[in-house]
């Protein structure tokens, strides 16, 4: 199981979970390994069974997440294990997704020995973002900002390129793929005209792009609206166009970001990386929405400009990682609360039983069939994102 957990960290499967699988032959030797590389691709069990072939018959499967029992873009893994003749299945974590769960019971009904909870805490650490999102039914939010050495995200006129090194920017692009979707505010689109893609050969599915543009002020001439990749405008209700997501207002007139995270979860997105700008991040912070903050500090200084973060933002947060990426300082911050707990803006909604739906890391040049080293983005654990809902 330890090897299956190691394998599970490979790939960029968002919005699906990370899953690893090891097949042991009847004599206990390893005959097949696999992991879920990308959404829409073969699941870990299928990849491992293909490698094992007939040697899987009578053997044992070690899987980090309960084998799925439904027909999605791929077939049910529980049936694949049965057809391969596996006689014993070890499971680290049971699947909290009701649409996919039930594989353990299906295997047991067919006479397969099933043991659950094997190395469960270790497996949950690799898959923490996805598990938390599914259990609380709202997307995991990862905030990300780059600032100068003196704490500015841009000059007074809004210009900022480039604060950090290419190594940090590549790391941030892979965070987009890890989360599966990325969000920026209107001003970021107008100032930088970003593509918001991962641009990495190991990423099969580019992230979904969200633009917080409550009053539809971003025109059609920006890169994010071009090409075949999906992009959605987040607006005030009512919705007027096909590629819009309407979000209800709060009493102070800002968009309800808690409602946004719940709505996109029900649309199939389990995570979102909020890249800014500073006003967007501040909106998320002020509403208590955010599971993790990735803060990149470059070596340049502006002297004056737009502050990256509001005064006192770190109250209630703790720094859990700090290291250098090239000449940049990278810090990972998490809220001081029980890991996996819903953000404060959502917690009251759960308690009241309300629904908001009514409102409508580093790859290498190794061959792709070989496991890559666990990226630091994955080792970091759950992410949290803030986006700007301000105009």
Image (cartoon, rainbow, N blue to C red):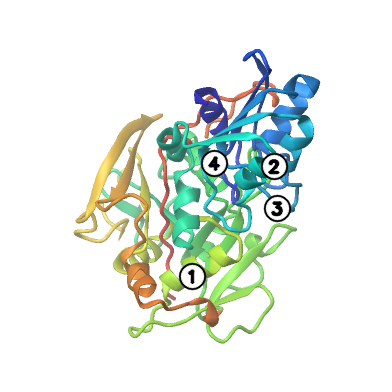
| Of callouts 3 and 2, the N-terminal one | 3
Mark 4 against mark 2, which lies toward the viewer? Answer: 2
Residue 78: which disc? 2
> Which residue is at a point 44% across and 45% down the rendered structure image?
128
The residue indicated by pointer 3 is: 70
Relative horizontal placement of residue 106, taking residue 5 as reference (left or right): right
Query: For the residue labelled by badge 3, is the local secondary structure a helix, a strand or a loop?
Result: loop
| Of callouts 4 and 2, the N-terminal one | 2
- The front one of 295 and 28 is 28
> Which residue is at a point 46% across and 48% down the rendered structure image?
129
Q: Position of residue 42 (x, y in %)?
A: 73, 39
Q: What separation in Å lies between label 4 and label 3 (alpha carbons)? A: 30 Å
Query: For the residue labelled by badge 2, is the local secondary structure a helix, a strand or a loop?
Result: helix
The residue indicated by pointer 4 is: 174
Mark 3 against mark 1, which lies toward the viewer? Answer: 3
Query: For the residue labelled by badge 4, is the local secondary structure a helix, a strand or a loop?
Result: helix
> Which residue is at a point 42% across and 78% down the rendered structure image?
354
| Of callouts 4 and 3, the N-terminal one | 3
Q: Is residue 38 visible?
A: no
Query: For the residue labelled by badge 1, is the local secondary structure a helix, a strand or a loop?
Result: helix
Q: Quadrant of the C terminus?
A: bottom left
Q: Is residue 311 visible?
A: yes
Mark 1 against mark 4, which lies toward the viewer? Answer: 1
Q: Position of residue 27 (x, y in %)?
A: 65, 12
State yes or no: discs 3 and 2 in contact (Cβ < 8 Å): no
Residue 260: which disc? 1
Mark 4 against mark 3, which lies toward the viewer? Answer: 3
State yes or no: discs 4 and 2 in contact (Cβ < 8 Å): no
Q: What separation in Å lies between label 4 and label 2 (alpha carbons)? A: 31 Å
């Amino acid at each position: 199981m330890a090897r299956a957990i190691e394998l599970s960290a490979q790939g960029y499967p968002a919005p699906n979970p990370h899953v690893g699988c090891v097949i042991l032959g009847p004599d206990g030797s390893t005959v097949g390994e696999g992991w879920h590389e990308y959404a829409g691709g073969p699941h870990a069990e299928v990849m491992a069974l293909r490698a094992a072939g007939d040697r899987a018959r009578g053997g044992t499967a070690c899987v980090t997440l309960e084998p799925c029992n439904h027909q999605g873009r791929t077939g049910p893994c529980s049936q694949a294990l049965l057809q391969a003749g596996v006689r014993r299945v070890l499971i680290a974590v049971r699947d909290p997704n009701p649409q996919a769960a039930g594989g353990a019971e299906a295997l047991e009904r067919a006479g397969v020995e099933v043991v659950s909870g094997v190395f469960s805490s270790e497996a949950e650490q690799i898959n923490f973002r996805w598990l938390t999102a599914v259990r609380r039914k709202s997307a995991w939010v990862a905030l990300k900002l780059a600032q100068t050495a003196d704490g500015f995200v841009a000059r007074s006129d809004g210009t900022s390129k480039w604060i950090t090194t290419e190594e940090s920017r590549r790391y941030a692009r892979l965070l987009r793929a890890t989360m599966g979707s990325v969000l920026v505010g209107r001003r970021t689109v107008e100032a930088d005209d970003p593509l918001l893609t991962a641009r990495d050969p190991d990423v099969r599915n580019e992230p979904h792009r969200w633009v917080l543009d409550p009053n539809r002020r971003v025109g059609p001439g920006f890169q994010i609206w071009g090409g075949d990749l999906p992009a959605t405008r987040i607006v005030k209700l009512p919705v007027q166009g096909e590629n819009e997501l309407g979000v209800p207002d709060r009493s102070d007139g800002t968009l309800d970001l808690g409602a946004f995270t719940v709505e996109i979860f029900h649309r199939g997105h389990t995570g979102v990386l909020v890249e800014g700008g500073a006003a967007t991040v501040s909106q998320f912070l002020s509403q208590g929405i955010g599971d993790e903050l990735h803060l990149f500090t470059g070596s340049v200084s502006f002297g004056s400009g737009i502050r990256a973060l509001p005064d006192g933002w770190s109250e209630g947060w703790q720094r859990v990682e700090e290291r250098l990426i090239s000449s940049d300082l990278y810090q990972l911050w998490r809220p001081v609360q029980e890991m996996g707990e819903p953000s404060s803006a959502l917690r009251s909604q759960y308690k009241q039983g309300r629904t908001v739906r009514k409102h409508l890391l580093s790859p290498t040049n190794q061959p792709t069939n070989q496991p890559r080293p666990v990226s630091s983005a994955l080792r970091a654990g759950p992410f949290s994102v803030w986006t700007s809902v301000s105009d």
